[in-house]
Image: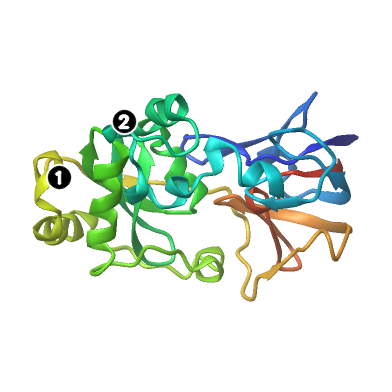
Amino acid sequence: MIYQGVLKKMMTENAAEILYYLDMNTDFINMNQLINKEITINFVTYECLNCHLEKKIYRQGFCKSCFFEIPSAADWIMKPELSKAHLGIEDRDLAYEQAVQLKPHIVYLANSSNVKVGVTRKQQVPTRWIDQGAHEAIEILEAPNRYLAGITEVALKDYVADKTNWRKMLKNDIEDVDLVAWRDKLKAFIPEEAKEYFIDDNVETHINFPVVKYPEKPKSLNLIKTPKYTGKLVGIKGQYLIFEDETVFNVRSNEGLVVSIEV
């Protein structure tokens, strides 16, 4: 069976073991069913996720012109503290920015390779944690807008990491920590204007990924340099496909690439 379509991040379903689905335009692939099977991935061309033209992908699945023009790729996406919709100030499209920024946002702690702080829209919990490959996570604060969540994240970065070590995460080189204790310890460093939104009565969420074998020395597949790859899928964690030969493929970082997948 051969499927072809433009890559977008895998959809997930929170279950006893995370379920993964890949949207290939006219078909949905249940990726869990491919574990322990050999698959071939072929790079075909590019397709910008916004304009849908055959243009080289620049970042986040978008061509260069779209990346610098569309509101969903503005700086406040990666840096929530730059959000200004709560002030009525437009960046690229105020209506879009109000629709996204003026919704409840969660500041959280996630443990994937280490304990890190992050921000996501409330509706993205626990999807965001799954995408990061976190085996445990907890909400710290629920803010009414993206700006307050963003300045809280910035304040907490002085005391906890804000990045995931992807190699360590994929090797499953992890340790369980007391995220409730971390949450309580960090409370003192939350900015005054956000302190009232602190959450003090929740528990950790634990996440299990469908992995048969973790790689000891993960090596990343670059489809542009290696346009055809065949391997036995042995697991999925975060947005990574893990293969028996220790090759790993980050689906999300390859959004906008048109590929064929042969099973």
How far across and how far down the image is residue 73, in percent?
55, 43
Residue 42 visible in rendering: yes
Above/below status of 138 relative to 170 = above
Q: Is residue 177 left or right of residue 251?
A: left
Please state which amino acid type lies under the numbered disc 1: Ala
Residue 63 visible in rendering: no
Q: Residue at x 51, y 47 (%)?
A: 131
- Which type of secondary structure does the marked residue at label 2 adopt? loop
Q: Which residue is mark 2?
A: 88
- Which is more toward the observer, 33 or 247? 247
Q: Residue furthest bottom?
A: 217
Q: Residue at x 13, y 60 (%)?
A: 189
- Which is more toward the observer, 127 or 154? 154
Q: Residues within 10 Å of mark 1 (few under 14, many from 20)?
A: some
Q: Residue at x 46, y 27 (%)?
A: 96
| Placement of the N terminus among the 4 image quadrants | top right
Q: Residue at x 9, y 50 (%)?
A: 192
Please state which amino acid type lies under the numbered disc 2: Gly
Q: Which mark is residue 194?
A: 1
| Placement of the C terminus among the 4 image quadrants | top right
Q: Is residue 233 left or right of residue 240?
A: right
Above/below status of 184 relative to 104 = below
How far across and how far down the image is residue 206, in percent?
36, 47
Q: First in sequence, mark 2 or 1: give its number.
A: 2
Q: Are marks 2 and 1 in contact (CB under 8 Å)?
A: no
Above/below status of 106 relative to 236 = above
